[in-house]
Amino acid sequence: MKKLALTRVNYSQLYSVYDNGKTYSKRDILIPYHLITLASYIRKYKIDVRIFDGEVDLFTQEQLSNEILEWKADFVGLTSTTPDIDLNIEICNLIKQENSEIITIIGGPHASALPHDVSKNYNVDYVVVGDGEDALKSIICDGCDKKIIYGNRQNIRNKEIPAHDLLDYDKYQFSDPHRGRIKTASVMSSRGCPFNCNFCFHDKKIRYRTIDSFVEEIEYLYKYKDVRYFYVYDDTFLINKKRVSKIADGIKNLQISDAHFQCLTRGNLIDDGIVKKLRDVNFVRMSMGVESGCDDILIDAHKGVKKIDYIDSCNILKSNGVEARGSFIIGHPYETHKTVMDTINFSKQLDLFHANFNIMTPYPGTGIYEMTLKGNGLKFRKKEYSHKWSAYRRWGFSVIQTDDLSGGDLEYYQKHAQTEFYTQDKIFKYYLNLFKYGNKSKYFYRPLNFAWNNKFGCNISFWDELEDSNII
């Protein structure tokens, strides 16, 4: 039987906003959902599959490669975003040094955006663009002779539940706002997003699973993996509200009242009716990309959402007892000191209770990348950053600058935004109540404590009462 090692690198090593390059041993980790969907599909063809997740134990590339080599894999499949592509290439190099007969395969967003660039690496045997199921079958079962393989973009055909049996769910926990870190599963009912944000690289064709298979997966995880928190990982879950309503009905019929859910959506898709329906089955958190506090910037970004939409959606979520989360970008084309402050002030105006402020990162395959190459409204801080992928982190470092803002300015404003947002009285009171409800996750309160230290030079009052968590 041929053996396939599906692999995720330790991505925590790339980010260092709060912990100076280190992280907590007890932290939020979502499952590698893309890998278990591939595993479920390919093992129908009598392929032995194992998941090697470097993030769980914070493995170095050497440690992860040694685990794969010890298992004596025939094929190694890796999925890569732009920030971790170099780590994935390093895995391929280490494996090939020990056994040149092992076949290496790289897919994921970066490979899909720059397949020819990735294929130039001598120790990468195949590059997969788009969906990986049929491409993996072609490589492993059919002996494909092309180095770059394009996946088929069809409706999600898998009738099988993704291969959750390959994961130890005790190792995957995420922060439920009301209960703290709890055993968590990612689930997905669709792939793709039809919108045209110029900073995002994604497949614009939506592919759906059947509603029954999605609800059955939730039931399986609840009964057999003791999962009580579900992260619905669709790019835009509320895109088809009739479908979402039927999903909510299916969840309600399961009678799993102690299970909580969260999802990703857009500000202009939220209405009171659908939120009430989802809150009734314990959707406790919704996240959306707000991006900017300037309508002109939102228009130029092709966002298709206005500031008033975010105001209305946050009000609706708050009135229904759903935690609203928003992400913002600092460093849009032609961004100025004024527009950044407009964004920071807008974040404080909204009924948001969690916010991320990312520095604009021009990922390959996006309109923003092309604009940055041409110097239209923003440019690379140094020429080498146009292809120095390890620097593309969004957090703590900027590879770009605008006409008005230097890279250093953008890094300053990121910290300033975090500080201003999380030192609001309403935010502290909200988080203090979550602590009283039973959320004792030290990892969860890092943004709040970071802001508190940055502004007041001290920890939040209940920091020492949170769960012990070694910094590694």
Image: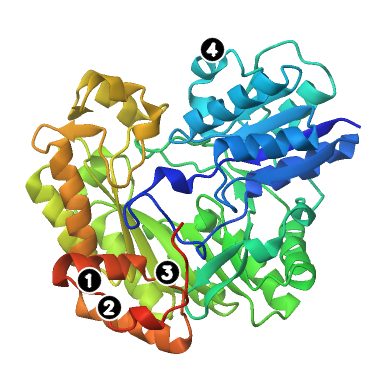
The quadrant where residue 322 appears = bottom left
Answer above or below: position of 254 versus 126.
below
Q: Which three-letter amino acid code belongs to the residue tagged 2?
A: Ile
Residue 131 can be seen in this image: no
**Label 2: few (<14), some (14–19) or many (≥20) C-alpha neighbours in 10 Å:** some
Q: CA distance from mark 3 to mark 2?
A: 13 Å
Which residue occupies the foreground of this view, 358 or 121?
121
Residue located beneath label 3 in the image: 444
| Residue displayed at 31% across by 61% down | 309
* Between discs 2 and 1, the one toward the N terminus: 1
Q: CA distance from mark 2 to mark 4?
A: 50 Å
**Label 1: few (<14), some (14–19) or many (≥20) C-alpha neighbours in 10 Å:** many
Q: Which three-letter amino acid code belongs to the residue tagged 1?
A: Trp
Q: CA distance from mark 4 to mark 3?
A: 41 Å
Residue located beneath label 4 in the image: 120
36 sits left or right of 177 in the view: right
| Disc 2 versus disc 4: nearer the observer | 2
Q: Secondary structure at mark 2?
A: loop
Residue 244 picture location, percent across and down: 60, 62
Answer above or below: position of 372 versus 439.
above
Q: Which three-letter amino acid code belongs to the residue tagged 4?
A: Lys
| Residue displayed at 32% across by 40% down | 302
| Residue displayed at 17% across by 70% down | 457
* Between discs 1 and 4, the one toward the N terminus: 4
Q: Which mark is residue 452?
A: 1
Q: Which mark is residue 460?
A: 2
